Amino acid sequence: MKVVLLKICELSFFFTALSMAQAQQTIGTVGVQDATVAGALEVSNGRAILVGNTTVTARDRTAEIALNRGGSVKVCATSGLHLTAGRNVDAAAVSVPPVSVPLMLALDRGAVEIQMAATTRDVVMTPDLRFTMRGDGPLDLELRVTRNGDTCVENRGVQAPVLNVADQFGDGAYELRAGQHVLFEHGSLKEVVDHESSSCGCPPEATMSVADALLHPAGSGNGAPGDATTAEKPAAEQHPFPAAVSAGLAPPSAAPPAPAGEVHTQVSAALSSGGDADSVAAPKASENALASAPAPAAVAAPQVPPPQQKRDVVHIVGRFFKRIFGGGE
């Protein structure tokens, strides 16, 4: 009797430990420097171990989750993803190798890139849509959700499984085949843009090669940190539009050289915006220009001819009669 009770206790402890292991099934790991993690987790060697039900919110860069079942999930910058591990109730769960634990991935906002060996028990969700796999296969899925609900989906790969898309709040359905790239406007299955051209995954991040990092280190003053091409571009390419000199975006034009023997004076005038809008401050000659200019040479003033006396008709007639009767002038 005692042996039977001992065996029963051993079996109960075994199943209890098995259920606890399933309840605490680890999903994967993510770098703590790349994302903020909420929920059940453990931290080891700078990586958060995701356990059970967790939420990963990427920081200002892409956070990559390494899945224990194989594959990865890239959470794009500032995006939030909920991960939940399902329970394996099949007898094959204790076999070697074990069957992959089903996952539910729920995207709140932003974009994700999912690359894993998907099964029919895996689920991908957005606030408006639900994606399930019709069959097992290599899943390479790019998914993006905007603020107005537009959902961009690309089922990449010729061997990708067919996705069954269902409406979360209705009875609509859509079939997304391998290699198909669509956009569900406002998250509706009735407003589908087929052959979508915009990318559904993470935007490309600015990268710098090792040579550029050595030639143009951050904070060197040659350009923006991490941007080697900006330092090599001239000002005309960085500012293709004419810029005001007063704004400091373009250098002032150099004054023309003064001819030899002449005084060259630079004059600056300030406009007034007060009550008298048309008034201009008195020009001020540059002291440096006056000090450096040579003394002007003495120039003779041109002689102005004396003004000619005007003679009208009366004077001319008077002088004529005076010569006749007066005997000369």
Image: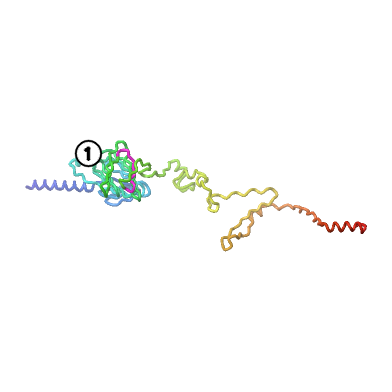
The crowd level at tag 1 (other Cα within 10 Å; few <14, some 14-19, many 20+) is few
Residue 48 visible to the viewer:
no
Residue 293: % across, % down: 67, 52
Number of disc labels:
1
Q: Is residue 6 left or right of residue 161?
A: left
Residue furthest to the bottom: 275
Residue 292: % across, % down: 66, 52
In the image shown, does 7 or 83 lie closer to the viewer? 83
Queried whether the magenta region covers residue 183, the answer comes back as: yes
Residue 102: % across, % down: 24, 44
Q: Quadrant of residue 162?
A: top left
Queried whether the magenta region covers residue 258, the answer comes back as: no
Q: Is residue 139 left or right of residue 298?
A: left
Region in magenta: 177-187
Q: Quadrant of residue 173?
A: top left
Look at label 1 and name its amino acid.
Pro
Q: Is residue 74 above or below residue 310?
A: above
In the image shown, does 118 or 40 lie closer to the viewer? 118
Residue furthest to the left: 1
Q: Residue at x 11, y 47 (%)?
A: 8
Q: Is residue 293 left or right of residue 77?
A: right
In the image shown, does 69 or 202 lie closer to the viewer? 202
Q: Secondary structure at mark 1?
A: loop
Could you tell me which quadrant the C terminus lies in? bottom right
Q: Which residue is mark 1?
A: 97
Residue 131: % across, % down: 27, 44
Q: Residue at x 59, y 62 (%)?
A: 276
